Image: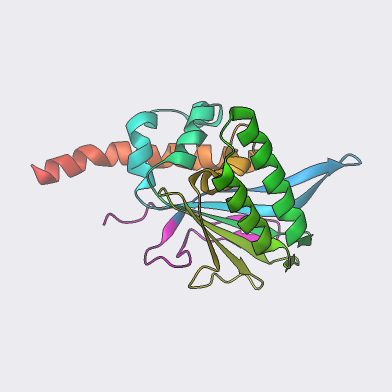
């Protein structure tokens, strides 16, 4: 296995996302691809509700390099397809949503569910399987309360498996709590954050900036690796 890309931590208000974490149920560390806040402008002032960190499996960089190496951060940030390739790429993703303001699980899951179902119906991909997945998703959250500094954790597998875990103290549990096998829902969680209508433009900018730099390092390193193998 190749070493993790070298990245730095990111701080959003009181929340610090470390450079690497080991997601629940995994034996390897993922690197911090980017992070940003989700908030709203209320009475002329931007209020942050959550801080969101997006971690990628180490194989994410070589996977993305095939199409995106040589692109600037600005080009990546402006590309819907780039973020779609992160969401659908053949590598695992780990998303940490940490509360800055308190939130109920019911409020969180209902908002995500509404957006998912509306999109799937619009594109004609809402089936009984998605309906059952949404029911399980909502059930997982219905009795949960998330005070400041607590987190919702998502493991997204390219096989279409979404693992959900909750943390009240900022730690990352060793095992997941709820597993939902539905590819559309699995991808929808990250899509809702960094997709075309994503709720965190800051996370998108952060991902574009950091991954552009990592792709440069990967591109510079590749010829050296080829020489070593020759």
**In this rendering, would 35 be left or right of 19?**
right
| Residue shown at 43% from the left, 28% from the top | 71
**Location of residue 170 (image quadrant):** bottom right
Q: Quadrant of residue 125?
A: top right
**Total number of numbered labels?**
0
Q: Quadrant of the N terminus?
A: bottom left
- Per the rendered image, the range of residues in magenta is 1-30
> Quick check: 84 left or right of 43?
left
Q: Is residue 24 above or below residue 47?
A: below
Seen as rendered, the residue at the extreme right is 43
Tell me the chief SS of the magenta region.
loop
Is residue 129 highlighted in magenta? no
Can residue 100 be seen in the rendering of this structure?
no
Q: Nearer the viewer, residue 65 or 18?
A: 65
Residue 108 seen:
yes
Q: Residue at x 73, y 68 (%)?
A: 143
- Residue 27 vertical position relative to residue 50 in the rendered view, above or below: below
Q: Does 166 sit left or right of 87 as displayed?
A: right
Residue under the point 41% across and 65% down: 26
Give above or below for 81 relative to 177.
Answer: above
| Horizontal and vertical percent position of residue 155 | 50, 57
Report x, y in % for residue 7: 45, 52
Residue 74: % across, % down: 53, 28
Quadrant for the C terminus, please.
top left
Let me know if residue 28 is in the magenta part. Answer: yes
* In the image, farthest residue toward the front: 128
- Looking at this view, name the residue that lies furthest to the left: 230
Q: How is the image coloured?
A: rainbow
Residue 55: give x, y in percent of width and height.
49, 53
Looking at the image, residue 3 sits to the left or right of residue 137; the answer is left
Q: Quadrant of residue 195?
A: top right
């Amino acid at each position: 296995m190749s070493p993790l890309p070298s990245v730095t931590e990111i701080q959003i208000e009181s929340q610090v996302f470390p450079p690497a974490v080991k997601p629940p149920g995994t034996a390897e560390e993922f690197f911090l691809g980017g992070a940003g806040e989700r908030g709203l402008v209320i009475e002329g002032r931007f209020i942050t509700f959550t801080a969101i960190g997006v971690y990628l499996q180490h194989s994410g960089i070589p996977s993305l390099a095939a199409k995106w190496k040589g692109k600037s951060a600005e080009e990546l940030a402006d590309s819907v397809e780039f973020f779609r390739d992160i969401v659908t790429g053949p590598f695992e993703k780990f998303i940490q949503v940490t509360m800055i303001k308190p939130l109920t699980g019911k409020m969180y899951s209902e908002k995500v569910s509404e957006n998912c179902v509306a999109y799937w119906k619009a594109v004609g991909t809402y089936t009984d399987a998605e309906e059952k997945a949404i029911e399980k998703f909502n059930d997982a959250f219905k009795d949960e309360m998330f005070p400041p500094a607590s987190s919702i954790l998502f493991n997204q597998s390219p096989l279409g498996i979404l693992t959900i875990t909750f943390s009240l103290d900022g730690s990352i549990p060793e095992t997941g709590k709820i597993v939902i096998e539905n590819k559309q829902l699995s991808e929808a969680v990250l899509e809702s954050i960094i997709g075309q209508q994503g709720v965190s433009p800051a996370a998108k900018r952060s991902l574009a900036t950091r991954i552009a730099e990592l792709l440069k390092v990967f591109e510079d390193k590749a010829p050296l690796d080829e020489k070593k193998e020759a």
